[in-house]
Amino acid sequence: MADSSLFRRTPDWTVDQVRAYMDQHEPEEYTLLDVRQPEEYTRGHLPGSILIPLGQLHQRLDEVDRQKPAILYCRSGVRSANGAGVLLNAGFEEVWNMGGGIMAWEGNVATGTPEAGMWWFQDARDPVDYLSLAWILEEGAKLFYGRMAEQFAEQDAGNLFKSLAAAEAHHKDTLRNLYGTLTGKEGDPLSPEEVAAYDRMEGGMSLTRVLEWADGKKAVDVLELSVAMEVNAYDLYLKVGQQLEQQESRAILLSLAQEEKVHLDRLNEALVRQRP
């Protein structure tokens, strides 16, 4: 059975801790990584930082020196927290997320999301257990996007959230079929009651808490959280898919990973259109 113990919190540093570290070390001793989009980076970035957009991080891990501590930042600390999780799951040892992001660096208030920065880690579990986890997260994401489609119905973001909710429902259909292939059983991996009891969504966050947080928030804040969610989902499907021995099942999960990557790219495009 999947459970939330598969998620850990990304280590955070405050802006003051990052400043102190940078004052005490030479720039070549660490990596300062900006995971925002190029348009955001062009508007302004921290001196000495290198740009690797979050959606490209999996493919560009070789550009990050594993021998150096890595400090990641973004607009508010949400995307960079999940970027730090990607590095940790890839075997990097010294990784910190700058809480509050560049907004906090500039003295502005960044409203962090509940449980933002949760990242899933690999464990020695059966593939069916991971499917159960994915089922829980997809249902949570579907409900979240559906609610956001209603909240932003009068804005362009509303249509995007509506289409993402439909895509998550399609992913559940795919997972149901894969569950049948792997177990020979018909039906869902978990009952609706079990899914509701876990109260989780992509990113390992509590659906209830995130919906409470999102109420009244601006589209830019919700879009940024959604980007982080999709990175987490992409990471899960990519890594678990690579572990499966059955070629057909492996191909299905890697295909789902690529679909999550498409969602991620669409969300990033929408995020850039939201001027600060």
Image (tube, rainbow, N blue to C red):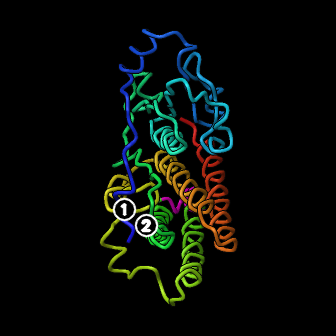
Q: Is residue 150 visible?
A: no
Q: Which numbered circle lies on residue 207?
A: 1
Residue visible at 50% across and 59% down? 152
The part of the image, by quadrant, that contains residue 170 is: bottom right
Residue 264 vs residue 32, the one in the foreground:
32
Q: Is residue 114 left or right of residue 76?
A: left
Q: Nearer the viewer, residue 177 or 230?
A: 177
Give the percent coordinates (x, y) of residue 104: 41, 27
- Mark 1 → mark 2, Cα distance in angstroms: 6 Å
Q: Count numbered badges in the picture.
A: 2
Residue at image location 44% in from the left, 57% down from the top: 123
**Mark 2: which amino acid?**
Gly
At numbered mark 2, what does the secondary structure look like: helix, strand or loop?
helix
> Where in the figure is residue 249, as x and y percent of width and height?
64, 73
How packed mark 2 is, by other alpha carbons closer than 10 Å (few <14, some 14-19, many 20 or more), is many
**Residue at x 66% of width, y 63% of height:** 254
**Dots 1, 2 in contact, CB < 8 A:** yes
Q: Quadrant of residue 125?
A: bottom left
Label 2 sits on residue: 140
Q: Work out whether mark 1 precedes mark 2 in sequence or the reverse, and give the earlier one.
A: 2
Placement of 182 over or under 197, stated as above or below: below
Q: Quadrant of residue 204?
A: bottom left
Residue 197, image x and y in percent? 30, 72
Say what amino acid the circle numbered 1 marks.
Leu
Question: Which span of residues is magenta-colored?
Answer: 152-159
Residue 93 to residue 114: above or below: above
Residue 189 location in percent, x, y? 45, 80
